[in-house]
Amino acid sequence: MSAVLSAILPVLAAVALMLVNGVVLIYMLRKVLGHLHLRLGPMHVGPKGIVQTTADVLKLLSKEDITPNGVDRWMYVLAPVVVFVPSLMAYAAIPFSETLRITRLDTGLLYTFAVLSLVPLGVIMAGWASANKYSLIGALRAAAQQVAYEVPLLLSVIPVVMIVGSLDLGEIVAFQTGVWMGVVPRWFIIPLLPSFAIFLISALCELNQTPFDMSEAESELVAGFATEYSSMKFGLIFLSEFSNSFVISALAVTLFFGGWTLPFVPEEILTPIAPLIFVLKTYIGIFVFMWIRGTLPRVRIDQLMNLGWKWLIPASLAWIMLVGVVVKLTAPGGVS
Amino acid sequence: MWGKGILNGMRITMRNMLRGPITVKYPYEKIELPERARWAVTPTYNEDGMPKCTACMACIRACPDHILDLEVTTREDKSKHIEHYSYELGACMMCGLCVEACPFDAIEMGHDYELALTSPDELTIDLLADVDAASVKRARPAAEPKPEEPKPEEPKPEEPEEAAE
Protein backbone atom coordinates (compact mmCIF):
# COMPACT_ATOMS: atom_id res chain seq x y z
CA MET A 1 0.00 0.00 0.00
CA SER A 2 2.59 2.48 1.03
CA ALA A 3 4.62 1.59 -2.03
CA VAL A 4 1.65 2.40 -4.22
CA LEU A 5 1.02 5.61 -2.32
CA SER A 6 4.60 6.71 -2.52
CA ALA A 7 4.50 6.06 -6.23
CA ILE A 8 1.28 7.94 -6.78
CA LEU A 9 1.80 10.93 -4.49
CA PRO A 10 4.70 12.47 -6.41
CA VAL A 11 2.71 12.20 -9.62
CA LEU A 12 -0.24 13.92 -7.97
CA ALA A 13 2.12 16.56 -6.67
CA ALA A 14 3.42 17.07 -10.19
CA VAL A 15 -0.12 17.40 -11.53
CA ALA A 16 -0.94 19.91 -8.81
CA LEU A 17 2.22 21.85 -9.54
CA MET A 18 1.39 21.83 -13.23
CA LEU A 19 -2.13 23.14 -12.66
CA VAL A 20 -1.07 25.82 -10.20
CA ASN A 21 1.81 26.76 -12.45
CA GLY A 22 -0.57 27.08 -15.40
CA VAL A 23 -2.92 29.36 -13.50
CA VAL A 24 -0.09 31.49 -12.16
CA LEU A 25 1.65 31.70 -15.50
CA ILE A 26 -1.42 32.84 -17.40
CA TYR A 27 -1.92 35.64 -14.91
CA MET A 28 1.77 36.47 -15.01
CA LEU A 29 1.83 36.40 -18.79
CA ARG A 30 -1.06 38.81 -19.08
CA LYS A 31 0.33 41.12 -16.44
CA VAL A 32 3.88 41.10 -17.78
CA LEU A 33 2.82 41.56 -21.39
CA GLY A 34 0.48 44.32 -20.29
CA HIS A 35 3.14 46.22 -18.42
CA LEU A 36 5.65 45.73 -21.22
CA HIS A 37 3.13 47.44 -23.47
CA LEU A 38 2.28 50.24 -21.01
CA ARG A 39 -1.02 48.57 -20.22
CA LEU A 40 -2.40 47.21 -16.98
CA GLY A 41 -3.39 43.67 -17.81
CA PRO A 42 -6.36 42.12 -16.01
CA MET A 43 -7.63 44.43 -13.27
CA HIS A 44 -11.23 43.64 -12.55
CA VAL A 45 -11.71 40.20 -11.06
CA GLY A 46 -10.31 40.38 -7.57
CA PRO A 47 -7.71 42.84 -6.38
CA LYS A 48 -5.40 43.66 -9.30
CA GLY A 49 -7.24 41.02 -11.31
CA ILE A 50 -5.65 38.19 -9.37
CA VAL A 51 -8.66 35.88 -9.62
CA GLN A 52 -8.99 36.47 -13.36
CA THR A 53 -7.29 33.22 -14.31
CA THR A 54 -9.46 31.24 -11.93
CA ALA A 55 -12.49 32.71 -13.59
CA ASP A 56 -10.99 31.85 -16.99
CA VAL A 57 -10.39 28.27 -15.93
CA LEU A 58 -13.96 27.96 -14.68
CA LYS A 59 -15.16 29.37 -17.98
CA LEU A 60 -13.02 26.91 -19.88
CA LEU A 61 -14.31 23.99 -17.82
CA SER A 62 -17.93 24.93 -18.22
CA LYS A 63 -17.76 25.46 -21.97
CA GLU A 64 -19.32 23.10 -24.45
CA ASP A 65 -16.90 20.46 -25.69
CA ILE A 66 -17.32 20.65 -29.45
CA THR A 67 -16.20 17.89 -31.76
CA PRO A 68 -16.46 19.26 -35.28
CA ASN A 69 -17.77 17.16 -38.14
CA GLY A 70 -15.15 15.50 -40.25
CA VAL A 71 -12.47 15.20 -37.60
CA ASP A 72 -10.53 12.01 -37.15
CA ARG A 73 -12.29 11.32 -33.89
CA TRP A 74 -9.79 9.06 -32.15
CA MET A 75 -6.81 11.16 -33.00
CA TYR A 76 -8.73 14.31 -32.15
CA VAL A 77 -9.49 13.06 -28.65
CA LEU A 78 -6.09 11.53 -28.15
CA ALA A 79 -4.00 14.50 -29.28
CA PRO A 80 -4.47 16.70 -26.18
CA VAL A 81 -3.53 13.72 -24.05
CA VAL A 82 -0.41 13.11 -26.11
CA VAL A 83 0.47 16.78 -25.66
CA PHE A 84 -0.31 16.80 -21.97
CA VAL A 85 1.23 13.57 -20.72
CA PRO A 86 4.83 14.24 -21.84
CA SER A 87 4.60 17.68 -20.24
CA LEU A 88 3.64 16.02 -17.00
CA MET A 89 6.33 13.36 -17.37
CA ALA A 90 8.95 16.03 -17.84
CA TYR A 91 8.63 17.03 -14.18
CA ALA A 92 9.91 13.64 -13.08
CA ALA A 93 13.61 14.38 -13.17
CA ILE A 94 13.66 18.05 -12.27
CA PRO A 95 15.52 18.58 -9.00
CA PHE A 96 13.81 21.21 -6.89
CA SER A 97 16.42 20.70 -4.23
CA GLU A 98 18.92 18.14 -3.06
CA THR A 99 16.11 15.90 -1.80
CA LEU A 100 12.92 17.26 -3.31
CA ARG A 101 12.37 15.63 -6.64
CA ILE A 102 9.99 13.07 -7.99
CA THR A 103 12.64 10.57 -8.92
CA ARG A 104 16.38 10.50 -9.19
CA LEU A 105 17.43 9.52 -12.68
CA ASP A 106 21.00 9.00 -13.76
CA THR A 107 19.95 10.06 -17.22
CA GLY A 108 17.70 12.89 -16.04
CA LEU A 109 18.74 15.35 -18.71
CA LEU A 110 18.36 12.87 -21.53
CA TYR A 111 15.04 11.70 -20.15
CA THR A 112 13.63 15.22 -19.93
CA PHE A 113 14.60 16.04 -23.48
CA ALA A 114 13.35 12.71 -24.75
CA VAL A 115 9.98 13.25 -23.11
CA LEU A 116 9.69 16.82 -24.30
CA SER A 117 10.36 15.73 -27.85
CA LEU A 118 7.10 13.79 -27.74
CA VAL A 119 5.12 17.02 -27.52
CA PRO A 120 5.44 17.84 -31.23
CA LEU A 121 3.93 14.44 -31.95
CA GLY A 122 0.76 15.43 -30.13
CA VAL A 123 0.80 18.77 -31.92
CA ILE A 124 1.02 17.07 -35.29
CA MET A 125 -1.78 14.70 -34.29
CA ALA A 126 -3.95 17.61 -33.22
CA GLY A 127 -3.33 19.46 -36.46
CA TRP A 128 -3.91 16.44 -38.64
CA ALA A 129 -7.02 15.21 -36.85
CA SER A 130 -8.73 18.59 -36.84
CA ALA A 131 -9.48 18.44 -40.59
CA ASN A 132 -8.83 22.15 -40.81
CA LYS A 133 -6.34 23.82 -43.08
CA TYR A 134 -5.11 26.22 -40.42
CA SER A 135 -4.59 23.42 -37.97
CA LEU A 136 -2.73 21.42 -40.57
CA ILE A 137 -0.47 24.32 -41.52
CA GLY A 138 0.21 24.92 -37.85
CA ALA A 139 1.00 21.29 -37.27
CA LEU A 140 3.36 21.09 -40.23
CA ARG A 141 5.14 24.20 -39.07
CA ALA A 142 5.39 22.72 -35.61
CA ALA A 143 6.85 19.57 -37.07
CA ALA A 144 9.38 21.48 -39.11
CA GLN A 145 10.38 23.83 -36.35
CA GLN A 146 10.31 21.70 -33.25
CA VAL A 147 12.06 18.78 -34.86
CA ALA A 148 14.66 21.09 -36.38
CA TYR A 149 15.36 22.90 -33.14
CA GLU A 150 15.58 19.77 -31.07
CA VAL A 151 19.02 19.27 -32.57
CA PRO A 152 20.63 22.54 -31.45
CA LEU A 153 18.78 22.28 -28.14
CA LEU A 154 20.42 18.96 -27.41
CA LEU A 155 23.78 20.03 -28.81
CA SER A 156 23.75 23.14 -26.64
CA VAL A 157 23.67 21.14 -23.41
CA ILE A 158 26.38 18.69 -24.42
CA PRO A 159 29.20 21.00 -23.21
CA VAL A 160 27.62 21.00 -19.76
CA VAL A 161 27.45 17.23 -19.76
CA MET A 162 31.05 17.01 -20.97
CA ILE A 163 32.29 19.18 -18.13
CA VAL A 164 30.23 17.54 -15.40
CA GLY A 165 30.53 14.05 -16.77
CA SER A 166 26.99 13.15 -15.80
CA LEU A 167 23.46 13.40 -17.12
CA ASP A 168 22.03 13.49 -13.60
CA LEU A 169 20.51 16.93 -13.14
CA GLY A 170 21.25 16.83 -9.42
CA GLU A 171 24.93 16.27 -10.06
CA ILE A 172 24.97 19.05 -12.62
CA VAL A 173 23.65 21.41 -9.94
CA ALA A 174 26.04 20.07 -7.33
CA PHE A 175 28.90 20.77 -9.71
CA GLN A 176 27.89 24.44 -9.84
CA THR A 177 27.99 25.14 -6.10
CA GLY A 178 30.60 27.49 -4.76
CA VAL A 179 32.50 30.30 -6.40
CA TRP A 180 35.52 30.82 -8.59
CA MET A 181 38.23 33.13 -7.33
CA GLY A 182 36.05 34.14 -4.40
CA VAL A 183 33.59 36.24 -6.41
CA VAL A 184 32.33 34.56 -9.55
CA PRO A 185 29.61 31.95 -8.98
CA ARG A 186 30.49 28.63 -10.54
CA TRP A 187 27.45 28.78 -12.79
CA PHE A 188 27.84 27.40 -16.28
CA ILE A 189 26.37 30.55 -17.77
CA ILE A 190 29.76 32.22 -17.37
CA PRO A 191 32.10 29.80 -19.14
CA LEU A 192 29.40 28.47 -21.46
CA LEU A 193 27.63 31.64 -22.53
CA PRO A 194 27.42 30.58 -26.21
CA SER A 195 25.81 27.33 -25.12
CA PHE A 196 23.26 29.26 -23.13
CA ALA A 197 22.51 31.56 -26.07
CA ILE A 198 21.89 28.57 -28.32
CA PHE A 199 19.86 26.89 -25.60
CA LEU A 200 17.71 29.99 -25.13
CA ILE A 201 16.95 30.39 -28.84
CA SER A 202 16.19 26.70 -29.32
CA ALA A 203 14.12 26.63 -26.15
CA LEU A 204 11.97 29.51 -27.37
CA CYS A 205 11.45 27.55 -30.55
CA GLU A 206 10.59 24.36 -28.70
CA LEU A 207 8.10 26.25 -26.59
CA ASN A 208 6.36 27.80 -29.59
CA GLN A 209 7.08 31.15 -28.01
CA THR A 210 7.17 34.37 -29.95
CA PRO A 211 9.29 35.12 -32.00
CA PHE A 212 9.05 31.47 -33.05
CA ASP A 213 5.35 30.84 -32.57
CA MET A 214 4.66 29.97 -36.19
CA SER A 215 2.69 26.89 -35.29
CA GLU A 216 0.14 29.03 -33.46
CA ALA A 217 0.51 32.38 -35.15
CA GLU A 218 -2.75 33.90 -33.96
CA SER A 219 -2.69 36.53 -36.66
CA GLU A 220 -2.38 34.05 -39.52
CA LEU A 221 -3.63 30.67 -38.38
CA VAL A 222 -6.34 31.48 -35.81
CA ALA A 223 -4.68 29.30 -33.19
CA GLY A 224 -2.73 26.90 -35.36
CA PHE A 225 -3.03 23.31 -34.29
CA ALA A 226 -5.39 24.23 -31.45
CA THR A 227 -7.92 25.98 -33.67
CA GLU A 228 -10.62 23.33 -33.53
CA TYR A 229 -10.21 22.52 -29.87
CA SER A 230 -12.53 23.86 -27.25
CA SER A 231 -13.30 23.47 -23.59
CA MET A 232 -10.94 21.32 -21.56
CA LYS A 233 -9.26 19.76 -24.58
CA PHE A 234 -8.02 23.21 -25.42
CA GLY A 235 -7.31 23.67 -21.73
CA LEU A 236 -5.00 20.66 -21.73
CA ILE A 237 -3.06 21.94 -24.73
CA PHE A 238 -2.83 25.36 -23.16
CA LEU A 239 -1.77 23.95 -19.81
CA SER A 240 0.87 21.78 -21.37
CA GLU A 241 2.33 24.80 -23.13
CA PHE A 242 2.71 26.74 -19.90
CA SER A 243 4.03 23.67 -18.18
CA ASN A 244 6.63 23.28 -20.90
CA SER A 245 7.72 26.87 -20.28
CA PHE A 246 8.24 25.95 -16.66
CA VAL A 247 10.14 22.78 -17.49
CA ILE A 248 12.42 24.43 -20.03
CA SER A 249 13.06 27.35 -17.71
CA ALA A 250 13.77 24.91 -14.89
CA LEU A 251 16.22 23.10 -17.16
CA ALA A 252 17.93 26.38 -18.00
CA VAL A 253 18.21 27.15 -14.29
CA THR A 254 19.55 23.68 -13.56
CA LEU A 255 22.06 23.64 -16.37
CA PHE A 256 23.30 27.21 -16.42
CA PHE A 257 22.28 29.02 -13.24
CA GLY A 258 23.17 26.64 -10.47
CA GLY A 259 19.75 25.15 -9.83
CA TRP A 260 18.65 25.46 -6.22
CA THR A 261 21.98 26.87 -5.02
CA LEU A 262 23.00 30.42 -4.41
CA PRO A 263 26.60 31.53 -4.09
CA PHE A 264 27.80 33.10 -0.81
CA VAL A 265 24.87 31.62 1.10
CA PRO A 266 25.88 29.03 3.71
CA GLU A 267 24.35 25.62 3.30
CA GLU A 268 22.40 25.56 6.57
CA ILE A 269 20.41 28.62 5.46
CA LEU A 270 20.12 27.42 1.89
CA THR A 271 18.81 23.91 2.49
CA PRO A 272 15.33 24.77 3.81
CA ILE A 273 14.66 27.41 1.15
CA ALA A 274 16.28 25.58 -1.76
CA PRO A 275 13.02 24.69 -3.58
CA LEU A 276 11.88 28.30 -3.22
CA ILE A 277 15.10 29.57 -4.75
CA PHE A 278 14.75 27.08 -7.56
CA VAL A 279 11.17 28.11 -8.33
CA LEU A 280 12.11 31.78 -8.07
CA LYS A 281 14.96 31.35 -10.52
CA THR A 282 12.66 29.41 -12.82
CA TYR A 283 10.10 32.19 -12.75
CA ILE A 284 12.77 34.75 -13.52
CA GLY A 285 13.61 32.62 -16.54
CA ILE A 286 9.95 32.53 -17.54
CA PHE A 287 9.82 36.30 -17.12
CA VAL A 288 12.68 36.57 -19.62
CA PHE A 289 10.71 34.39 -22.04
CA MET A 290 7.72 36.69 -21.61
CA TRP A 291 9.92 39.74 -22.00
CA ILE A 292 11.17 38.36 -25.31
CA ARG A 293 7.61 37.50 -26.25
CA GLY A 294 6.45 41.01 -25.52
CA THR A 295 9.21 42.53 -27.60
CA LEU A 296 10.01 40.62 -30.74
CA PRO A 297 7.86 40.13 -33.82
CA ARG A 298 7.34 36.70 -35.33
CA VAL A 299 10.05 35.64 -37.77
CA ARG A 300 9.27 34.06 -41.11
CA ILE A 301 9.44 30.29 -41.42
CA ASP A 302 12.40 30.47 -43.85
CA GLN A 303 14.29 32.79 -41.51
CA LEU A 304 13.62 30.35 -38.72
CA MET A 305 14.88 27.40 -40.71
CA ASN A 306 17.95 29.35 -41.85
CA LEU A 307 18.75 30.28 -38.29
CA GLY A 308 18.33 26.74 -37.06
CA TRP A 309 20.11 24.71 -39.71
CA LYS A 310 22.68 27.17 -41.03
CA TRP A 311 23.71 28.95 -37.86
CA LEU A 312 22.74 27.27 -34.64
CA ILE A 313 23.68 23.70 -35.50
CA PRO A 314 27.12 24.53 -36.99
CA ALA A 315 27.77 26.99 -34.18
CA SER A 316 26.91 24.48 -31.50
CA LEU A 317 29.00 21.78 -33.18
CA ALA A 318 31.98 24.12 -33.33
CA TRP A 319 31.44 25.11 -29.71
CA ILE A 320 31.23 21.47 -28.65
CA MET A 321 34.56 20.81 -30.36
CA LEU A 322 36.16 23.78 -28.64
CA VAL A 323 34.81 22.82 -25.23
CA GLY A 324 35.78 19.21 -25.84
CA VAL A 325 39.38 20.18 -26.53
CA VAL A 326 39.52 22.43 -23.48
CA VAL A 327 37.98 19.78 -21.24
CA LYS A 328 40.39 17.17 -22.52
CA LEU A 329 43.37 19.47 -22.00
CA THR A 330 42.45 20.53 -18.48
CA ALA A 331 41.00 17.30 -17.18
CA PRO A 332 43.10 15.49 -14.62
CA GLY A 333 44.85 12.60 -16.34
CA GLY A 334 44.24 14.17 -19.74
CA VAL A 335 46.77 15.45 -22.23
CA SER A 336 48.52 18.39 -20.62
CA MET B 1 18.28 42.95 -37.14
CA TRP B 2 19.45 39.86 -35.27
CA GLY B 3 21.76 41.63 -32.86
CA LYS B 4 21.47 45.30 -32.10
CA GLY B 5 17.83 45.53 -33.09
CA ILE B 6 16.78 42.79 -30.71
CA LEU B 7 18.72 44.29 -27.83
CA ASN B 8 17.31 47.72 -28.54
CA GLY B 9 13.78 46.31 -28.61
CA MET B 10 14.34 44.52 -25.34
CA ARG B 11 15.65 47.74 -23.82
CA ILE B 12 12.60 49.66 -24.98
CA THR B 13 10.08 47.17 -23.62
CA MET B 14 11.91 46.98 -20.31
CA ARG B 15 11.90 50.77 -20.12
CA ASN B 16 8.17 50.72 -20.80
CA MET B 17 7.67 48.17 -18.08
CA LEU B 18 9.51 50.32 -15.56
CA ARG B 19 7.60 53.37 -16.70
CA GLY B 20 4.35 51.85 -15.57
CA PRO B 21 1.05 51.73 -17.38
CA ILE B 22 -0.44 54.85 -18.91
CA THR B 23 -3.95 53.45 -18.95
CA VAL B 24 -6.75 55.62 -17.59
CA LYS B 25 -9.29 53.26 -16.07
CA TYR B 26 -12.05 55.12 -17.80
CA PRO B 27 -15.35 54.46 -16.10
CA TYR B 28 -13.67 54.78 -12.70
CA GLU B 29 -11.37 57.66 -13.38
CA LYS B 30 -11.72 60.36 -15.96
CA ILE B 31 -9.17 62.68 -17.34
CA GLU B 32 -9.86 66.39 -17.33
CA LEU B 33 -10.61 67.60 -20.82
CA PRO B 34 -8.63 70.47 -22.25
CA GLU B 35 -10.46 73.76 -21.95
CA ARG B 36 -11.23 74.00 -25.65
CA ALA B 37 -12.41 70.42 -26.08
CA ARG B 38 -15.48 70.39 -28.31
CA TRP B 39 -18.36 68.12 -27.44
CA ALA B 40 -22.09 68.58 -27.52
CA VAL B 41 -23.48 72.10 -27.87
CA THR B 42 -24.94 73.42 -24.63
CA PRO B 43 -26.68 76.70 -23.91
CA THR B 44 -25.21 79.13 -21.38
CA TYR B 45 -27.18 81.03 -18.77
CA ASN B 46 -27.02 84.37 -17.01
CA GLU B 47 -26.68 84.55 -13.23
CA ASP B 48 -30.43 84.82 -12.90
CA GLY B 49 -30.84 81.47 -14.60
CA MET B 50 -32.24 82.87 -17.83
CA PRO B 51 -30.63 81.74 -21.08
CA LYS B 52 -28.31 84.19 -22.78
CA CYS B 53 -29.84 83.31 -26.13
CA THR B 54 -31.49 86.21 -27.90
CA ALA B 55 -32.91 84.06 -30.68
CA CYS B 56 -30.89 85.91 -33.31
CA MET B 57 -30.65 82.75 -35.46
CA ALA B 58 -26.93 83.23 -36.18
CA CYS B 59 -26.14 79.69 -35.10
CA ILE B 60 -28.85 78.20 -37.26
CA ARG B 61 -27.42 79.95 -40.31
CA ALA B 62 -23.88 78.94 -39.40
CA CYS B 63 -24.54 75.25 -38.93
CA PRO B 64 -23.18 73.33 -41.93
CA ASP B 65 -25.23 70.26 -41.07
CA HIS B 66 -28.52 72.08 -40.57
CA ILE B 67 -29.14 70.33 -37.31
CA LEU B 68 -30.02 73.32 -35.18
CA ASP B 69 -33.61 74.48 -35.23
CA LEU B 70 -34.99 77.45 -33.39
CA GLU B 71 -38.71 78.12 -33.30
CA VAL B 72 -39.51 81.53 -31.97
CA THR B 73 -42.61 83.68 -31.57
CA THR B 74 -42.38 87.44 -31.43
CA ARG B 75 -44.77 89.21 -29.08
CA GLU B 76 -46.39 92.57 -29.73
CA ASP B 77 -43.73 94.38 -27.70
CA LYS B 78 -41.09 92.80 -30.00
CA SER B 79 -39.85 90.58 -27.20
CA LYS B 80 -39.13 87.07 -28.33
CA HIS B 81 -40.20 83.78 -26.86
CA ILE B 82 -38.29 80.62 -27.70
CA GLU B 83 -40.72 77.77 -28.31
CA HIS B 84 -37.96 75.28 -28.70
CA TYR B 85 -34.34 75.28 -29.65
CA SER B 86 -33.59 71.77 -30.85
CA TYR B 87 -30.29 70.16 -31.60
CA GLU B 88 -29.75 66.88 -33.40
CA LEU B 89 -26.85 65.36 -31.55
CA GLY B 90 -26.54 62.34 -33.81
CA ALA B 91 -25.71 64.47 -36.83
CA CYS B 92 -23.51 67.02 -35.11
CA MET B 93 -19.86 66.94 -36.14
CA MET B 94 -18.80 69.17 -33.27
CA CYS B 95 -17.25 71.72 -35.61
CA GLY B 96 -18.02 74.60 -33.30
CA LEU B 97 -19.10 76.99 -36.05
CA CYS B 98 -22.37 77.77 -34.24
CA VAL B 99 -20.44 78.78 -31.14
CA GLU B 100 -18.16 80.96 -33.22
CA ALA B 101 -21.14 82.55 -34.88
CA CYS B 102 -23.02 83.34 -31.67
CA PRO B 103 -22.59 87.05 -30.87
CA PHE B 104 -23.79 86.62 -27.28
CA ASP B 105 -21.79 83.58 -26.20
CA ALA B 106 -25.16 82.05 -25.58
CA ILE B 107 -23.99 78.56 -26.58
CA GLU B 108 -20.75 76.74 -26.01
CA MET B 109 -19.18 73.42 -26.84
CA GLY B 110 -19.78 71.44 -23.67
CA HIS B 111 -17.37 69.06 -22.01
CA ASP B 112 -19.83 66.24 -21.56
CA TYR B 113 -18.38 63.46 -23.70
CA GLU B 114 -20.51 60.59 -22.46
CA LEU B 115 -23.11 61.02 -25.17
CA ALA B 116 -24.27 57.45 -25.65
CA LEU B 117 -28.03 57.04 -25.54
CA THR B 118 -30.31 54.05 -25.54
CA SER B 119 -32.68 55.18 -28.25
CA PRO B 120 -32.15 57.07 -31.50
CA ASP B 121 -35.14 59.25 -30.64
CA GLU B 122 -33.20 60.75 -27.77
CA LEU B 123 -30.61 62.08 -30.17
CA THR B 124 -32.72 65.14 -30.88
CA ILE B 125 -32.30 67.28 -27.83
CA ASP B 126 -34.23 70.41 -26.91
CA LEU B 127 -31.56 72.76 -25.70
CA LEU B 128 -34.13 75.37 -24.72
CA ALA B 129 -37.89 75.15 -24.68
CA ASP B 130 -40.68 77.55 -23.82
CA VAL B 131 -38.48 80.26 -22.42
CA ASP B 132 -38.18 83.98 -23.01
CA ALA B 133 -35.26 84.98 -25.14
CA ALA B 134 -32.82 87.43 -23.64
CA SER B 135 -33.18 90.91 -24.97
CA VAL B 136 -30.37 93.23 -25.67
CA LYS B 137 -32.49 96.22 -24.66
CA ARG B 138 -33.48 94.60 -21.41
CA ALA B 139 -29.90 93.64 -20.62
CA ARG B 140 -28.67 97.22 -20.99
CA PRO B 141 -30.79 99.00 -18.33
CA ALA B 142 -30.02 96.17 -15.99
CA ALA B 143 -26.35 96.85 -16.47
CA GLU B 144 -26.62 100.50 -15.36
CA PRO B 145 -27.78 100.27 -11.74
CA LYS B 146 -25.06 97.80 -10.87
CA PRO B 147 -22.03 98.93 -12.80
CA GLU B 148 -19.54 96.87 -10.83
CA GLU B 149 -20.80 93.38 -11.33
CA PRO B 150 -21.92 93.21 -14.91
CA LYS B 151 -18.91 95.15 -16.11
CA PRO B 152 -17.23 92.13 -17.69
CA GLU B 153 -20.48 91.52 -19.49
CA GLU B 154 -20.71 95.01 -20.89
CA PRO B 155 -18.84 94.35 -24.11
CA LYS B 156 -21.29 91.61 -24.90
CA PRO B 157 -24.37 93.77 -25.29
CA GLU B 158 -22.38 96.25 -27.33
CA GLU B 159 -21.07 93.71 -29.81
CA PRO B 160 -24.49 92.49 -30.85
CA GLU B 161 -25.53 96.05 -31.54
CA GLU B 162 -22.75 96.38 -34.02
CA ALA B 163 -23.56 93.02 -35.42
CA ALA B 164 -27.21 93.89 -35.66
CA GLU B 165 -26.49 97.09 -37.42
Image (cartoon, coloured by chain):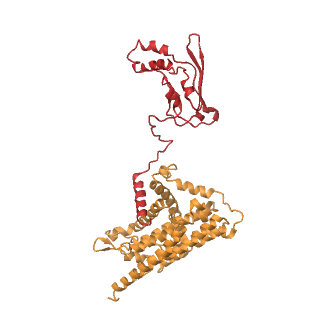
Chain colours: A orange, B red
Q: Quadrant of the N terminus of chain B?
A: bottom left
Vertical relation: A168 (above or below) B12: below
Which residue sits at x=39%, y=55%?
A: B15
Rendering coords of residue B93 (x, y %): 56, 36
Vertical relation: A333 (above or below) B64: below
Rendering coords of residue B164 (x, y %): 50, 18
Q: Quadrant of residue A170?
A: bottom left
Left or right: residue A140 compared with residue A210: right
Rendering coords of residue B6 (x, y %): 43, 63
Of the pair A55 and A328, the residue shown nearer to us: A328
List the single residue furthest toward the front.
B165
Of the pair A38 and A243, the residue shown nearer to us: A38
Can residue A204 be seen in the rendering of this structure? yes
Which residue sits at x=54%, y=71%?
A: A145
Can residue A161 be seen in the rendering of this structure? no
Question: How many labels were placed on the picture?
Answer: 0
List the single residue furthest toward the left.
A182
Of the pair A186 and A171, the residue shown nearer to us: A186
Vertical relation: A127 (above or below) A50: below
Rendering coords of residue B34 (x, y %): 44, 37
Which residue sits at x=47%, y=36%?
A: B37
Left or right: residue A333 compared with residue A240: left
Which residue sits at x=45%, y=52%?
A: A38
List the single residue furthest toward the top.
B77
